[in-house]
Image (tube, helix red, strand yellow):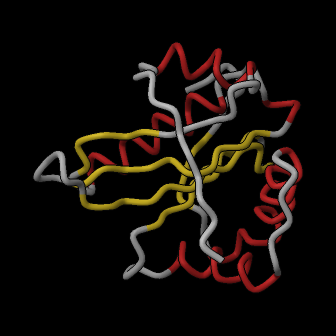
Amino acid sequence: MSDFGVDVRPLAVGDRDVWEPLWQAYLDFYGQDLPTEVVDLTWARFADPAEPMGGLGAWADGVLVGICHYVLHPSTWSAGCSCYLEDLFTTPAARGRGVGRALIDATAAAARRAGAEKLYWQTHTDNATARALYDRVARHEGFVVYERALN
C-alpha cells in the first residue's frame, strides 16, 4: 500500500469512462494518436478471457489515478510464460506517491498467478521520473530496443 492509499484492481467493463482519459493522457505523453477502432479493440481485449492481456487500475478515494496494461506470452527462454508490462501511467498528482510501484507490484502478482517467470518493460531513455522508480524495483539488463514498422 502506498502513502496515497491506493487500491489496485483489474479494470472492469464499467470503468471505460474513467480509463479513457488516462489512456489518452498516456498517449499524449508519448506523442501518439490511435484510431478509435484500436482504442475500442484494446478496451475489449481486457474483458476477453481468451486474450492474453490485462488492465489494472489504481484508485485513490474512488478516483482512478493510474493504469497499466500487460501482455502474457510464451518464451523461448523458459518453460513458463513471460509478462510484458506494456503501458504504465499515473496522473501527475499521483506521481511520487507509490502508485506506479503499486501497479508494478500488482502486475507482478497477476503474472505470477498466470505462471509467468519474468516481468519486463521498457521506457524512453529520457523518462527520468519513471526510470528513478524502475531502477528501485527492477534491474536494467542493458538491452536496447529497436522497432521496425511493418505497415
- In the displayed structure, 142 sits above or below 85; it is above
Q: Which quadrant of the figure has residue 24?
A: bottom right
Q: Which quadrant of the figure has residue 108?
A: top left
**78 left or right, relative to 105:** left
- In the displayed structure, 99 sits above or below 8; it is above
User: Residue at image x 71%, y 68%?
Assistant: 15
User: Residue at image x 89%, y 52%?
Assistant: 28
Tell me the quarter of the image containing the N terminus.
top right
- In depth, the one of 133 and 65 nearer the eye is 133
User: Residue at image x 16%, y 52%?
Assistant: 80
Residue 27 horizontal/vertical position (percent): 81, 55
- In the displayed structure, 42 sits above or below 98; it is below
User: Residue at image x 14%, y 47%?
Assistant: 78
Residue at far left of view: 79
Q: Which quadrant of the figure has residue 4?
A: top right
Tell me the quarter of the image containing the C terminus.
bottom right
